[in-house]
Image (cartoon, rainbow, N blue to C red):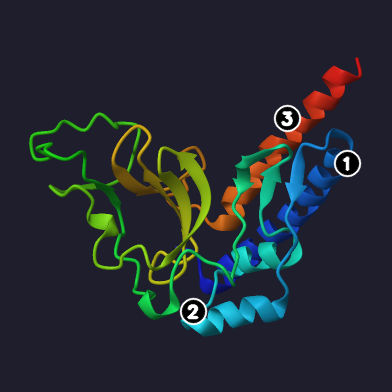
Amino acid sequence: MESGEGMFKAKLIIMKTLTEKFHVLQKLNEKTKTFIFQPCLNAVEIEKFESKFNISLPEDYKYTIKNLANGIYYNGLESLRVFEKMDPDNAFFLQDEYVWSEFPLDKRLYFGYPGQDIQKEEDEESWYPYETEYVNDSNPYNKGGTTYNTINILSTGCGGYDFIVVNGKEKGNIWCYNKLSNNDIYPLYNFEKNMKRISFGDWLLFTVEKLIDFEQKKITDNNP
């Protein structure tokens, strides 16, 4: 396991690389006009949000929304985003009802569909290479305030979304609430790179690199 110092240095490298790639994407976007980069939050707005809920946002997420962009939207397609804007003054909760409990999961959770006997269900999601817990419950994740420790970063359709955990042992990791093809929740991973968890910085860097390739191809195709 990496030491605390090693992890810190690795995150600094990711942030440096992400910043460089972000600027490349912005330059390409000056030609293609594909994206709208949402204005960054300032330090006061972020500190106010953290103080309000007595939390500390993951450093790579905080760095991004403060220095790079607080969300990226597709130009002309308002509902399509690269990652969601975080609005500290108009969030999806009420302050007196919102409690930042500790994120309860540490492995993939498969809860199937109403009426499904999970104990007899053969898991068809063999693509997932790590440990899975099976439960007979229509949706245990949304009960007991367990969603009150995450920030949504991307809608994946049909009510599903990717989210960043803001506290507990999984703090800083990206998880997926999958309602499109299955009813499960799992941490995002990169099996080829032997990464059982992906941080927000990793997640956004992977995404931005793909977008750069896409934008470069678009410019080349339009200028043969």
Q: Which residue is mark 2?
A: 55
User: Residue 122 at what x, y percent from top left?
Assistant: 16, 30
**Quarter holding residue 165:** bottom left
Of helix, strand and loop, which one carries label 2? loop
Left or right of residue 36: residue 165 = left
- Residue nearest the observer in this picture, 209 or 50: 50
Q: Earlier in the sequence, mark 3 or mark 1?
A: 1
Residue shown at the point (91%, 19%) measured from the top left: 223
User: Residue 224 at what x, y percent from top left?
Assistant: 91, 14
Depicted 83 relative to depicted 49: above or below: above
Residue shown at the point (85%, 39%) measured from the top left: 28
- Label 2, label 3: how far apart the Cα atoms are: 37 Å
Of helix, strand and loop, which one carries label 1? helix
Q: Residues within 10 Å of mark 3 (few under 14, many from 20)?
A: few
Q: Name the mark on residue 214.
A: 3
User: Residue 40 at what x, y percent from top left?
Assistant: 73, 64
